[in-house]
Amino acid sequence: MAAVAVIPEAAAGPAAATPRGGRVWRRLVLGLAALYFAVPMAVSFWFTVRTGDGGLSLAAYGRILSAPGFVPSLLLSLGLAAATITLVLLLTLPAMLAARLGAPRLGPLLEVIATLPLVVPPITYVVGIGTALRGGVDALAATPLWATLIAIQDERFPVVLVLAYVMLTLPFAHRSLDAGLRAIDVRTLVEAARNLGASWPHVLFRVIMPNLRPALAGASFLTLALVMGEYTVAALLGYQTFPVWIVTVSGNDGQLSVALSILSLLLIWSLLLTLSGAGRRRS
Amino acid sequence: MPLLTVVAVAFGIPVLTLLAGAFTVEDPATGTSTFGTANLSRSLQDPYLGTISSSVRLSAVVAVAGAVAGTILAQAVITSRFRALRETVLTFSGVLANFGGVPLAFVWIATLGNSGVVTTMLGLGSGVLYNFWGLALVYLYFSVPLMVLVVTPALDGLRPQWREAAYNSGATTWQFWRHVGVPVLAPALLGGVVLLFGGAFAAYATAAAMVGSTVPLVTLQIADALTGDVLVGYENIALALSLDMIVVALLVMAVYLPLQRRSSRWLR
């Protein structure tokens, strides 16, 4: 999931005139596309509900709750997502506001920083993290930093994953907030509020944040979807997040893992649909 | 700036370690390490070169096929009379383009895997999915929607008036596409191809959950080197392979960003 794409807005004006004889191929194309995209989904659902003797049953979905490790891994992923969202917003929003208000030269720098994680594929990033952690533990064994290094790799809540996810989501958070900030006149809002006697925290929480609500929600949703679906980094660093757990479980029970996949998809899709719905209403 | 600090720590250290490791050659006999390019040159020889070229071929197939299919689909949707269809397809594309990783693999295993529903229904036998073309088919599931999203604004930019002007001047449909449509769309199309290539090249979770190691891919090779039985110096090969991947990704971005800027010129 390298590219979290954004849905283009509908163009104004009527659709282009139909060229002669275009209807047949259009139906053919749409039919083939519908087949290609719908069949795997429908068939997967069928796969999870059929039973050995030809009957139907939702037992595979019932087994999810009782499967060992389901609750801890889901909670871990949700916790990581919450921490990542908080951290990525805390880091990017003040920096981007500062770039707009006081230090315009920061803007291009932020853009470069936000593009960097796109250049490094997650698999190579995790190789770097793994090597750095191992090397760090050896090199810093005698110093107080050693305890920090061990602490951020805590199995119950690996801070190192949060840091990695902040990097992976940075481009998308930046893009979403940038679009939101572009739509409002930050400088005028801030100056007006300050002239009326508002304090800086008041300006931030009562003036800027409400105006940015769609952008903040968008950035949070994208981050949530990304963290809930991220496999590469967590698997290679050896943590049991939700997607990693799905793969672990798949060895024993094919139906269960497909049922889980469908459920996690529905979760992510409803998030993204809410997001695109919010985007539509704004525009 | 807290952001800069966090980026420096969480991003700078791993990348620098990666660079340092890729250029560090460990002597298995003495255990001393020296600075050199031996890892890099080994990572560009067999068997590692094979995985890189396999990855590149897979990504190229996915990128070209996805770009062609996505453009055709987008054009079919855009010229349709039903606006609801357009909204639906775009929304679904936005959702499916983000559909990668583990769930994608399992959905396809349930469909075309060895005991998949379609496999048994059509009696296809085993191993349909677990090869190069099976993986390409699965990657297209998120690549085609991504292409639809990328190319739709560009196709919208093709004004109906241009088409009418061309037809009124006596041009055929072929001539219109040859001299007007494709040249205007070229940056957007190429940009889409490059983007799809990058996405397929970096994908790991789907392949890992689906084919294991029956299809040699550079991402799988790196993961093996990292988690498997680590021989001395083998780990640094993984670092060198990672560096190779970053170089490819850098090339992808270097081509993509100017193209994107160029294509947006027509989209006002």
Image (spheres, coloured by chain):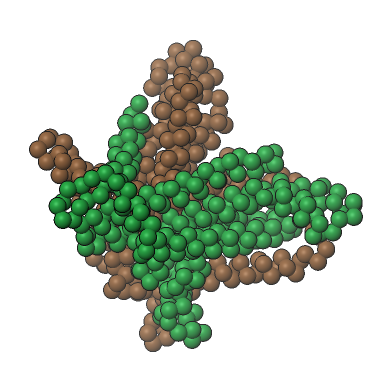
Whether residue B219 sits left or right of residue B74 in the image: it is left
**Residue B232 is drawn in which quadrant?**
bottom left
Residue A171 x/y as whole percent: 45, 41
Q: Could you say which chain is coloured green in the image?
A: B
Residue drawn at x 27%, y 52% as measured from the top left:
B236
Tag count in the figure? Answer: 0
Q: Position of residue A192 (x, y in %)?
A: 52, 16
- In the image, taking residue A230 as reference, residue B149 lies left or right, namely right
* Rendered view: B252 above or below A191: below
Q: Nearer the viewer, residue B198 or A278?
A: B198
Please state the horizontal and vertical placement of residue B54, each as a whole percent of the image: 45, 64
Residue B267 coordinates in the image, percent (x, y):
68, 42
- Is B93 in front, or is B55? B55
Q: Is residue B218 visible?
A: no
Q: Nearer the viewer, residue A65 or B183?
A: B183
- Chain given the colour brown: A
